[in-house]
Amino acid sequence: MPHLLRELAPQVLGVLTRRHGDFAAAEDAVQEALIAAARQWPAAGIPTNPRGWLYQVARRRMTDHLRSEIARRKREDRAAGELAAAEPCAPPPDAELGLARDDTLILLFMCCHPALTAASAIALTLRAVGGLTTAEVARAFLVPEATMAQRISRAKGTIRSSAIPFAMPTDRERAERLGAVLHVLYLIFNEGYASSGGSELARVELSNEAIRLARAVHELIPHDPEVTGLLALMLLTDARRAARTGEHGELIPLDEQDRARWDRALIAEGVALVEDALPRGAVGPYQLQAAVAALHDEAARAEDTDWAQILALYEVLRRMSDNPMVSLNHAIAVAMVRGPAAGLALLASLDADERIAGHYRLDAVRAHLLEKAGDSGNAVRYFRAAAERTTSAPERNYLLAKAARLAWRDEHGRGMLRT
């Protein structure tokens, strides 16, 4: 049921916003409808028309909001007209609530309006379109949850005061908002492919929705190389999904995956998109990341991976991006080409970057490189530190298992030497 609610929420939000023109009130009404559904559906069963049910409940909340606003402002002369327009009626046919104009895509571009800062636009879109909780959005931005809650609230206020219309933007407006749109789709996909918290490694409904929206943007703007690159990156990454978990949901790292389980149709589509995007001119970060993903996917075995070419791509990517995660991946590529000591030396510089210092991925990568360097004791220590910091149960279990196996092997090896 949570998956269904997450899928329907942006659709109902789009319809309400289009009809009533108040994004903030519509978002609040939809949230209340979702809470009502979460309470009622488990006992009463999912309605025949769940989207119509959510819309009807949310519209009633909108009616209450309009009544409150009208009373507060004492606009008696307009009250009758506004209330008549908002009064609940029979639920509209499901087709009327459909996505013939793809309200979710319109909502995506609306939330990425230039009246908002880039950070606020992305945060709001993750919340309203991606269905992420405020805590999940905060983790994606590496900021406290309270900070993110304030940012989202301010963004909704900006949309209200700016009277941003609910409509597909013009070509010029799309160009202005495209960077934020692509970034938010990238973050939604990442949260779906590798969930930042909880008992499941992935949230398939999120990654699938990100791919669906990326395809829609690609159809809308087919010749933009970064749009093409982002779609390619998603497909090439998602192609490995079936091999990322074992029989009991445990995490399987890339170099240990059964590559026969990778989706070859998605890989072929992704590679074709990369080959289409790269020759067009200016190369952007999504194209470069897609090229890296293609090199991984085209290697028949882990040991066949062209790490030298991957390193070259990360060198270019690092020059155009100040993202600490890019620097982390660059350090891994350096270690694979020049040895673990070279990679560890690069990690030392990230310890001073407050955006990633103390992040579990930095500890996990350091542990992995220490293991490769033969420093088992410190590798165990950092695997355990990473496990304590992650909020993802599958990743925690994997890191603790790595630490336990390495500690046992180290102790067993010393015992053999003493014997």
Image (cartoon, rainbow, N blue to C red):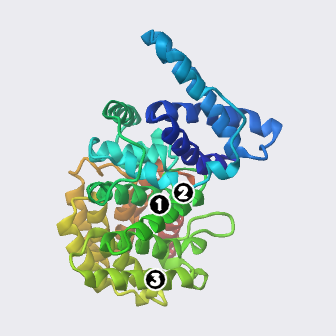
* Amino acid type of the residue tagged 3 in the rendering: Asp
Residue lying at 71% horizontally and 45% vertically, measured from the top left: 50
- Tell me if mark 1 has few (under 14), some (14-19) or many (20+) residues whose alpha carbon lies within 10 angstroms of its own: many
Q: Nearer the viewer, residue 332 or 290?
A: 290
Contact (Cβ within 8 Å) of mark 1 with mark 2:
yes
- Tell me if mark 2 has few (under 14), some (14-19) or many (20+) residues whose alpha carbon lies within 10 angstroms of its own: many
Residue lying at 38% horizontally and 58% vertically, measured from the top left: 361
For this orientation, the residue located farthest to the left is 319
Q: Secondary structure at mark 2?
A: helix
Residue carrying label 1? 189
* Amino acid type of the residue tagged 2 in the rendering: Leu
Q: Which comes sooner in the sequence, label 1 or label 3?
A: 1
Q: Nearer the viewer, residue 372 or 81?
A: 81
Label ID, residue 206: 2
Q: Position of residue 223 (x, y in %)?
A: 33, 75
Q: Nearer the viewer, residue 367 or 273?
A: 273
Picture quadrant where residue 158 is located = top left
* Amino acid type of the residue tagged 1 in the rendering: Phe
Q: Secondary structure at mark 3?
A: helix
Q: Nearer the viewer, residue 44 or 20?
A: 20
332 left or right of 7 in image: left
Q: Position of residue 4 (x, y in %)?
A: 66, 50
Residue lying at 55% horizontally and 43% vertically, measured from the top left: 15
Residue carrying label 3? 297
Q: Position of residue 208 (x, y in %)?
A: 55, 63
Residue lying at 52% horizontally and 16% vertically, measured from the top left: 79
Q: Is 272 placed above or below 383 here?
A: below
In this view of the protein, can residue 131 be seen by the observer?
yes
Contact (Cβ within 8 Å) of mark 2 with mark 3:
no
Spatial CA distance of label 1 from label 3 is 18 Å
Q: Is 22 placed above or below 245 here?
A: above
97 left or right of 366 in image: right
